[in-house]
Every structure is written in C-alpha cells, then in structure tokens.
Amino acid sequence: MNQISEYKTNTASGLLVAGLSFACLAVPARSQENGSDAFFELDAISISANRIEIPVQQVGSTVDVLDAYELQNGQDIFLVDALREIPGLVLRNNGGPGGTFGITTRGLSSNRPTVLLNGIEVSNPSNGQIMNLGNLFTNSASKVEVLRGPQSSLYGADALAGVISVDTLGPGTSNGGRALFGYGSYDTLDYGLGHSGSNGAFSWQVDGLVHESEGFSSQSPEYGEAWADDDAYDNTTLNGAVKYQLNDSVSLHGSAIYIDTFSEFDPGDPAWIWGVPSSENYATTEQLFVRTGSDFQLSEKWDSSVNIAYSDVDTLSQTESGPYYASGKRYKYDWINTVEANERWTMVAGLEYEEEKNLSDVGNRNDTSLFVENVIEYSDALDVTIGARYDDNSAYGEETTYRATFSYRIEDMDARIRGSYGSSFQAPSFYELFNATYGNPSLKAESGKGWDLGIEKTLVNGKLLFSSTAFGNNVKDKIAWDGVYRNLNEYESIGLENAVRYQLSDSLRLKAAYTYSDAEEDNSAEALRVPRSVASIGGNWSGMDGKLGLNLDALFISSQYGDSSSRSAGTKLEGYEVVNVAATYQVSDLSTIWVRFGNVLDSEYEEISGYQTAGANVHAGVRMNF
C-alpha cells in the first residue's frame, strides 16, 4: 500500500472511531445567558482601535473583537485557523501549521499587519516577518482584536495593513488549575498544564502547552523520495503573567512568553533541484517576549502607563545550500497617557523609543516617536477621532502619519455608519536594506493611504446584524524583489466586506461573510496572492442546558495567482472550499470533552503554490479544571 492510500485509510478509520465516540459521548457550548450579546459584539470593548478601552459601537475603524468562546468554537489548535473567517483576511501556510506563514489583508498581500502579543510587537527584528499565527495556540488566547485599515498613526511602522492584537490568559482570567490532553490525525499529541490565582494584592497566571505532530508531506510525494516523507512539527510554549496592586491608583505588571518550535519542510520546486537532496530541510525558532511596567493615576482625570518590552527571536533554516539565520533583538520603552479633558473629549498621547539589533546580518537602528489621539464624543450619536504620529528612524528617516474616524448611530433605524481615512508606512527590513547579496540600502519606506466606509443595521428585533464596508488602499514605493529589492511605482486595492449574523434562537446562531478584493501592482498587473472572492458560512448550536455544543464552518476561496511565474503564464491556483465540524460536551463543572473533524470533504487544495494542505483529519481531547 502506498503512503497516500495508507494515509486515507488511516484517516477514514480515525473518522469512524471518532464518530462512534462522538455519538456515544456527545460534546460544550457556552450557557445561554452568556451567548447573545457577545455574539453580536454589542457590548464588546476594543483597546487596539484607540489605545484605550472604548465600546465597539463607538469605534470608527473596522474592528472584530473575539473572546475566548468565539475563538474556541471550532476547536482549532492554532490561531491561524481560528481567524480564517474574519472578513478581509486571507491566511496561508506552506504545508502544516509550522510552515512559512503569509497573510493578505484587504488586498494587501505582502504588507503585513502589526501583530501584538500582550501588547508586545512580535515580528522578527531581523527580517521583519510577523509571528506565524500557526505557532500560537488558540487555547491560550483570551481575546483577539483584528483592526483593519492603516494604523501607523497609533502603532508606527508596519501597521500599514492594520493590527492583530492577541491577549493570552492573564491574572484574574480564572482561578485554579487547568489541564488539557488531545490526540488526532498525523500522530498529533497536545497536552498542557496551567494555573491562575491570587493572594491579596498579588495575582498570577502560568501555562505550558506542547504540540507534537508527525505531520504530512508538505509537497507532492510524486516529486521523489526526498519529498515523500512526513514533515514533523513540534511546539513548546510557556507563558506567564503577574500583577501586584500597590494601592487604588498604582499597579505593577509583567508578562513573558517563550515559544520553541521545530518544523521539517520539503526541498522546494524540483525544477530548481540538481540531483537528489542529500540532507533534510528543517527550521527551528526560539522566541522570547517580555514586558513589564506600571499603570498609575497622576490625577483623577489623568491615567499613565510606563512599560519596557524585550523581544529576542532566533531562527535557523537548514537547507541543501546551507543554513540561513534570521535573528534579532528589540527593546521598546513607552510612556502612554490618557487625559480626560472634559466629559466628551479624551486625549491619548505617548512617547516611544525603540532599538532594534540585527544579529544575523549588518545593521542596527533606533526609532523615536510621538503620537496623539483625540477621542471626541461630539454628540450622543456621533463619535470622532483625530490622531497623528511622528517617527524619526535612524535607518530610513522621518515619517509623519495621521488618521481620522467617525461613528454615527441612527437610533431610530437601529443602524450605524462608520468610516476612517489615514496614512501609514511600512519600513524595509534589515534583510531588505543590508543583506550583502540582495539588499538595497537606498530603499525607501513604503507609504500608503487607506479608507473605509461602512454601515451596520440590526433587524428582527435585534437578532439579525448586517454590516457592509467598502475599502480602498493606495501604496507608493512598494518594496518588491526581482533579483534585488527595489521600490515599485504603486500598488492599489479596492473591495467590499459583508457580514451577517443571525441569532435564530437562544440555542442557534448563524453567520456568513463575503469579501471582494481587486488589487493591482505597477498600475497594470493583477496582484499576487489576492483571491477576488472569499466567503464563509457557519453555525453554532447549543443544547442540554448549554452543555452540548455543535459548530460548523465552511470557507470558500476563489482562484488567485500564487507567484510571478504563474502570473506570467496566466495560470492561477484553483479555488477551493474547506468544511470543518466540531463538538464539545461539558461532562461536569470540571471537565469538557471535544472533537474536531477538519476538512471533512477531504478537499485537495493549495494555499501557496506547490504546497499541500491537510486532508480529512480528526482530533479529540479533554479539558479539565481543578
């Protein structure tokens, strides 16, 4: 029996066993009293949109706020899969979860959003690559905010395509111990332990999670023996946080996250391989992110925060041609102030200093920045924000960015109109600037402007929520590679995001989304890795007094150009659909069992040209509290 046939047989057997187990055991939804408001995000609070807590209904930018329940509905192991249904996002991996990660945001295929993990920017300081969301466990996330549109006026370089802010479990999230165990296809094993608690003014949280998987062949086994073996992926993540409340107006906090991964990958396009590869290809990463600081009140209307953040990212890719290192450190110091000027005007102002060190190539740089954000409640129905930022970087010079937003609520129509317009920039990485072979020290930072205009409307006595948002981006001096890095003339994208959520009953919730994106680079060529249409549908049902939960989601991606050679040949990656089903059952107050059937239609598709994705698979496990 060949490897593919054996895999399909094992998968079918696994699905049958899991299905029988599910039929006998069943599996949690959140109780009804917790479900309705959070489903529509009516009471959700955003922090990323203005760097202060503000109700989503008053935010002018487009932001999705997902709590732990929504993130874990689908029982996805990694965050990369839990975010695929967010309108405007297209996420991709070359192979399994540990492969090279990419993201398209509102038609911007190579402009990466800023990713924050507990307030820490988690890109690699050396090559600028954002953290692979396939390395972050969904189970450890307590909240995710996806902020779309240009955000450099708040977050500086690399926020041209928006911000993804991830909060992990922290002090006060829960009390007591927790454990999880899971097993599934590809000999995948997941296990973890954690504890949260408090003692007087001191509170803490600590978690350890491990993922071990034999994986699957990330490229076609038909290429040869070197491509036919399974590509393993291992991940060990440790994170912890502490908080100490000195008094009513002063607190101290600290958090740390350590991620250690190992992933195998295939040699690449056989057309570029001379002979049979003589060594295995693999990548290792060690990432440490630490942040400590203090929140305090300078007066009744003046809150202040000082923080120090440290990032240390070491990556090694071992290939046939030798090792490639991308390692760097980042030190960031910030002082953020929130001043209530009057009942309707709040000002947020900050001073930041950042130092980046490239350990694998030439170049260090520092950046000093100052930003101001004005949050104005112009009337009971209208909220407006106006903000600007100044950055002075030792490597690419000075940048000034701005942003304005509005949110207008039409109470008589149960509707809201919102919009934003702003400028942003994306800095060239150390690799793009200083690499001895491919770098270009004359590269300029990309500069962009973007806008969106949206409407939200509730129907059926508030049970049905519809939203539609038009958006556009224009990027100048976009960085591209054609043997050496250079600045393109221009890159443009335009599109429409639509979403519907319907609470059919207390136990059944439905949702659907559709995004259309049209992007061009150099004024004529259709952009790479930008599918014109992305759609998703889903549903979540709870029963047995909230103990049983069933979840279904389906994702549909249209065809797209995967790389420049396929665009030259006029050959696109085929569109595809993926359907996942999950179920949970709360056995007791202390234990919950779950099962997830991934790609139940066993669709064969590629997210990145030449790289396979998982076929039909099943994972199941148990979560316990003690």
Image (tube, rainbow, N blue to C red):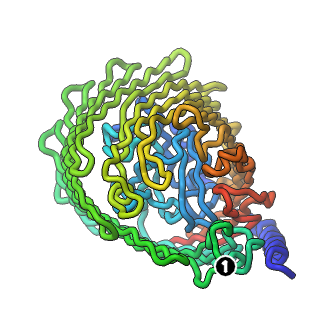
Identity of the residue drawn at 40% across and 63% down: 437
Pinpoint residue 178: horizontal percent, then vertical percent.
49, 72
Identity of the residue drawn at 63% across and 32% down: 463
**Is 585 situated left or right of 108 in this image?**
right
Q: Up-down: is 328 above or below 517?
A: below
Front residue of this view, candidates 601 and 512: 601
**Is 60 situated left or right of 181 in this image?**
left
Q: State whether residue 539 appears in this view.
A: no
Q: Quadrant of residue 450?
A: top left
Q: Residue furthest left?
A: 298
Identity of the residue drawn at 59% across and 37% down: 525
**Is 148 situated left or right of 591 in this image?**
left
Pinpoint residue 50: horizontal percent, then vertical percent.
34, 38
Identity of the residue drawn at 61% across and 43% down: 530
Front residue of this view, candidates 375 and 421: 421
Q: Quadrant of residue 518?
A: top right
Secondary-structure class at tag 1: loop
Pinpoint residue 508: horizontal percent, then vertical percent.
70, 44
Pinpoint residue 147: horizontal percent, then vertical percent.
45, 41
Q: Residue furthest bottom?
A: 278
Three-letter amino acid code at disc 1?
Gly
Front residue of this view, candidates 26 and 136: 136
Front residue of this view, candidates 554 and 318: 318
Q: Up-down: is 225 above or below 456?
A: below
**Quadrant (top left/top right/bottom left/bottom right) for the N terminus:** bottom right
Q: Residue furthest right?
A: 1
Task: Count all numbered tags in the image, as a single digit.
Answer: 1
**Is 611 situated left or right of 320 in this image?**
right
Q: Badge 1 local density, few (<14 within 10 Å), some, or many (20+)?
A: few
Query: Where does label 1 land, which residue?
Result: 275
